[in-house]
Image (cartoon, coloured by chain):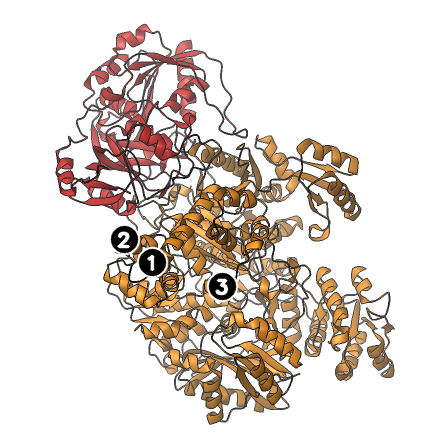
Chain colours: A orange, B red
Amino acid sequence: MPKRKDIRRILVIGSGPIVIGQACEFDYSGSQACKALRSEGYEVVLINSNPATIMTDPDMADRTYIEPLTLEHVEEVIRRERPDALLSTVGGQTGLNLAVALAEAGILDHYGVELIGAKLEAIKKAEDRLLFKDAMTKIGLDVPRSRLVNNVADGVEFANKIGYPVILRPSFTLGGTGGGIAYNREELEEILQRGLDLSPVHEVLIEESVLGWKEFELEVMRDLADNAIVVCSIENFDPMGVHTGDSITVAPAQTLTDREYQMMRDAALACLREIGVDTGGSNVQFAIHPETGRMVIIEMNPRVSRSSALASKATGFPIAKIAAKLAVGYRLDEIPNDITRKTPACFEPTIDYVVVKIPRWQFEKFPGAEPVLGTQMKSVGEVMAIGRTFKQALAKAMRSLETGKSPDAEEYDESLIPKRLITPNPERLKYIRFAFQRGYTVEQVHEMTSIDPWFLEQVRQLVMLEQELARESLDTITPERMREAKRAGISDDQLARMWKCSPMEVRRRRLQWGIRAVFNRVDTCAAEFESFTPYLYSSYETECEADPDDRRKIMILGSGPNRIGQGIEFDYACCHASFALREFGYESIMVNCNPETVSTDYDTSDRLYFEPLTLEEVLNIYDTERPQGVIVQFGGQTPLTLALPLKAAGVPIIGTDPDSIDLAEDRDRFGRLLDELGIPAPPYGSATTVEEACAVAARIGYPVLVRPSYVLGGRAMVIAYDEETVRRYMREAVVFSQDRPVLIDRFLEDAVEIDVDALSDGEDVLIAGIMEHIEEAGIHSGDSSCVMPPTSLSRTTIETVVDYTTRLARALRVVGLMNVQYAVKNGTVYVLEVNPRASRTVPYVSKATGVPLAKVAVGLMLGGRLRDFTDLTRGFSSGVLPVPQYFVKSPVFPFQKFPGVDPALGPEMRSTGEVMGVGQNFGEAFAKAQLSAGVPLPDRGRVFISVNDKHKPTAVQLARQFVELGFEVIATRGTAAALAAAGIPHRRIFKVNEGRPNVVDLIKDRAVQLIIYTPTGAQSFSDERVIRRTALLYNVPCITTISAARAAVEAVISRRRDPIRIWSLQEIHGIERAPAQLAG
Amino acid sequence: MSKAILALEDGSVFEGCSIGAPVERAGEVVFNTAITGYQEIFTDPSYAGQIVVLTNPQIGNYGTTPEDSEAPRPYIEGLVVRDFSPVASNWRSRLPADEFLKQYGIPIANGIDTRALVRRIRNYGAMRGVLSCVPGADPQQLVEKARRIPPMAGLDLASRVTTPQPYEWNQGLEPCSPSEHLPPTRPRRFHVVAYDFGIKRNILRLLAHFGCRVTLVPAHTSANDVLGLRPDGVFLSNGPGDPEPLTGPIGEIRKLLGKKPIFGICLGHQLLGLALGGKSFKLKFGHHGANHPVINYRTGRVEITSQNHGFAIDPDSLKPSEVEITHMNLNDHTLEGFRHRWLPVFCVQYHPEAAPGPHDSRYLFEEFIALMEQHRQG
């Protein structure tokens, strides 16, 4: 079947901001889909609220809308653009839900838009738990037994029938509230009664527990001719009970015979057909009882998912790209396999290596959250590693995680082994290793973890080998032993620690013996056909397939696993660097280990090395490829920490010299530089002991900001108002900054913070973006909303900022990108931090200005001057780039996923993603950003105001505006008095600790639509915490800074005044685009 | 641990650890790319005379179970793998895979860079080789030995693996899990005589499952004897090696054409091709795997198929007036199936019985049943 010619224009909906459970894998799938559709000559209209994505680059679609993913805004896109079809399956759950909502609201019918990929009926059948179970039962597939009950007696009877434990799920409660697991009748009665009470329909689903069963996933695809294939099988290391996103997973499945695997394949394809996914990829999840072999189907996603991204990277089969082509009518056998070129995509990839994915958690950022894993996903990112064996892949994956903790520094407590093994938690794998070190048997560990003995045996063998090696030394080790260690995936670093020598000594020794890494290809076919795609992983086999060529080439180091503070923005920059290199006539070589990203798409760069970002692995690649240069400034902190060691090993780093990077990070050196330049900074000092820290703090005066010297997303950063806090911090922070001192800065209260991104060729400096933070200083820049252009800065301030930035760039001899953070207080501009590298804001600034910052930066790093790229920079090679509208960037937080955590903002970054709002005025842009961030500001209703004395005058002004806008104002005692004095009508309400009703009751009654309060000191801390937590649970916007409150008023005004209006990036930046030709 | 040496006729030598029987075996070295199903591969008689390299690096993980054997014993000459697991983990496992092979004296080379080996075979074709797990073997002598092995082309291996005596088979498919969804069994209504050139049990299980009583007969049974058994249909099985030397069976098959419905698989397909005047040739390194896309021209659908053959029929050698090409391999466009335009004869090169591999092509057994039904009525 050829592609469809009755459709020309296709709408693609993205997945919005990065949140836990929905991350950059959907940028990967969305970008692939857009590229595939455009290459077929279709016009693509895209909407996504996330500016940090590659997919929202203006050249990925014909029309790109960075607008809120709401029914109204998507309808507006449809009204303006009149697409013929909507591809529902590449934008994650968000995209799928929106597609359903549009269809159900009649919008698609009204505008004649056809749903392609998965039809409405199929989506509903897959997504509705009961419809799905019925459908599966109908085709003879086994599902966990379940029954809906509305009284305790029925529940007890059913539980007796299926046996304990049972899972309880009350119907229609918020976030699954009231559910649980009952291990006995007593618990069942208790949880069931509570669940029935909580359920508005007095109904609870009781389900057979499959905890501890073996867990598998199959990635399947189907075309309109009903050809169906399995792309990849995945087996979870962690059995049922841990969310797949939080499980260590392995491809291909390791412990199934062909009989069992084919049974699962038959079931998956039958499921796909019954649900009726016409075209594209789906993911089907199964559980198998480890002793009886009973197999139940758990769920299916009728769309491209996180697992499909993993499966694509694990096999080299680009699921999203193929899904897009199938959606427009192609058959699987009409699409060629890019990697072999000669064979079609209608086949099942076979792999001759093992892939291991390990999630990356950050519980340390959420004090109060219990670090326990369950059915709700908690990880913020993941790594994937490819090895010739499971052991090698596992070892590589573990070091790809970059947990920042060296294994030596970790302390294990033997008495904790049972607890850490029985209850799944982020440390479980480490504790399994520890248990084996202590002589536990596979059987014992299996009993506690239910993890399949095969996996456990592999881990045990690795631990045993490590113990044997630890008895050797650099002098006693034999070449055979050394090779065995390397083939098992053990790093030079690890060997060096065992042998008390340096990793370089280990490296030199093994190289002398000819034990060097070689590279194998990921080729979809286990070498049966020749591969034309250099998608490589390292091993210690006998033959190297890297086959490097003699072209001019540059290697880019990626940013590793997503984590808070180092996420998709850096991948965005790395991808652009790669695109730019190709455009400037260089071969681009990407190194990264994050399977979710666009950078690890084999299409993004000329050559892809899927490898851990460690010195050892990067040097291996360098030795093989011999590139002219290595780019370290786009991938965030991960490659930067490698910059100096790489330079020391003779690797040419292009762009800003690693020494300048070091200078900017080294407080003393940097302080001297600022003194020389006469640029003010807040008083500071550094300390390596508790006493020293207290002395420094006392000298520079409280409040102080305390942090480790190498910072990632404000990790382990606090504002201390007293010595007690400094002491506590020093005791806890040392883990994170082994031999680096702690930095102590004076904290500037109530200052306005500014982020600046600049491009520099070493002489000329172009200010790409001046971003004014909406929250005051003290809130991590990544957690603060910001606006371009700045709205409250004076001309003098901006001139000062330009002057300082220019001089800093020259002094640091920055070549490429630089980010500077400033604080403005009482008219003085202070430098807070300089990062001579790409920052988190590069994609946002690129989208606001229409200038591809990363691309220009690469041009500069290759030796160009700013004046050579004026065609890209709208004619500017110095000064400040203009911004044609208002662009607000707002953060998105994962607090909903961490019950018990105080959702207060501070100097430690906690947001996982960002959105952008575009407007004709600041209020409009801010309102849209808040809407996209999931906390829409109200346009009517009640506002609660409670502020400290300092903020009362401003609060009075704001209250007046709210009243004029028709809001009812509610205030607590102090604020109410100020309002009364100003004659503003209001209602008084108790503070939380005074009595009831108070604001918490109002939130729960949904009787308040906006909360504004500013911290009033330690005694009210618990009040504030409960307000924030309740507001979060009920999704009421809760504003905690006075400047954000001001912004909120403007947003409310805009909501009431401005119609729903949207702009595509192409129209904002005047980008002309040749109309697509529907070829073929 | 003792050494295992695999020496190829081109002079290349691969060294690993011996974890199987401490013996030396010779054969054609071929690779199989299936991810699952090593036990079915070990016990497929079509591998007689071959040393098998598995591309999946992790082998042995799920042990072995008697139900998954495709013949009473393994037929591979030797096994070459990257990482063999001594620990078997699966609820159906009865015996670890290395012990299973050791029982039958089969050598295993573990820790081999199988990818490099596969790339060599892909580039230079299937090669003769010697796998020695005997301590003190000299690699150069093994290479010399490899060069002296008779080549695969021209060898009549089927006669070596066929059953010496006729026997009956009536056992259908059994589920491997309480959740397995098998096709419904049919009442036993047909008698099929199956030529055993090295037949896989799953063919027999499927025939029985779909309502056939199967009588297996030795490869050199005459057409008259077959017809004397009064079958409703004749089945031509898979089997090892080159079809050309099987001139006897080819002649008998020719006599059976038109007499009874005939269904052939793999070697059976090649023999039918030769019986109809076609020509066979040796593929560079054969098809051995479970992921080959085959298009069925009659339905337009693509089946993912299980494959195991080193020879193929040249489609241009068949008379278009007499033979309709029904299936084609989408990877390399080799012939995968044909049927006679007016006689009740059809066959496929690949393995619709799977084991190991996908079940996409089971419908062919039903077509055979339908053909016998039709023939009986007509």
Image x and y of residue A607, in percent: 34, 60
Instruction: Give me the chain letter of mark 1.
Output: A
- Is B194 in front, or is A294? A294
* Chain for numbered disc 3: A
The lab-note entry on whether marks 2 and 3 share a chain reads: yes
Which of the numbered marks, if any, corresponds to residue A480?
2
Q: Chain of mark 2?
A: A
Q: Is residue A750 above or below residue A594?
A: below
- Residue A563 shown left or right of residue A465 in the figure: right
Whole-angstrom CA distance, mark 1 to mark 2, is 13 Å
Pinpoint residue A35: horizontal percent, then vertical percent: 44, 57
What whole-number distance in Å separates the C-alpha atoms at marks 3 and 1? Answer: 27 Å
Identity of the residue furthest to the top in this view: B228
Which disc, if any, is residue A871?
A: none
Q: Earlier in the sequence, mark 2 or mark 3?
A: 3
Residue B153 in sight: yes
Residue type of the residue flagged with mark 1: Glu
For the N terminus of chain B, the quadrant is: top left
- Which residue does the numbered mark 3 point to in the structure image? A403
Residue A835 at x, y percent in the picture: 47, 78
Looking at marks 1 and 2 on the same chain, the residue that comes earlier in the sequence is marked by 1
- In this view, the mark in front (2 or 3): 2
B222 or A778: nearer the viewer: A778
Sooner in the amino-acid sequence: mark 3 or mark 1: 3
Neighbour tally class for label 1: few under 14, some 14-19, many 20 plus, Cα within 10 Å: some
Q: Which residue is mark 1?
A: A472
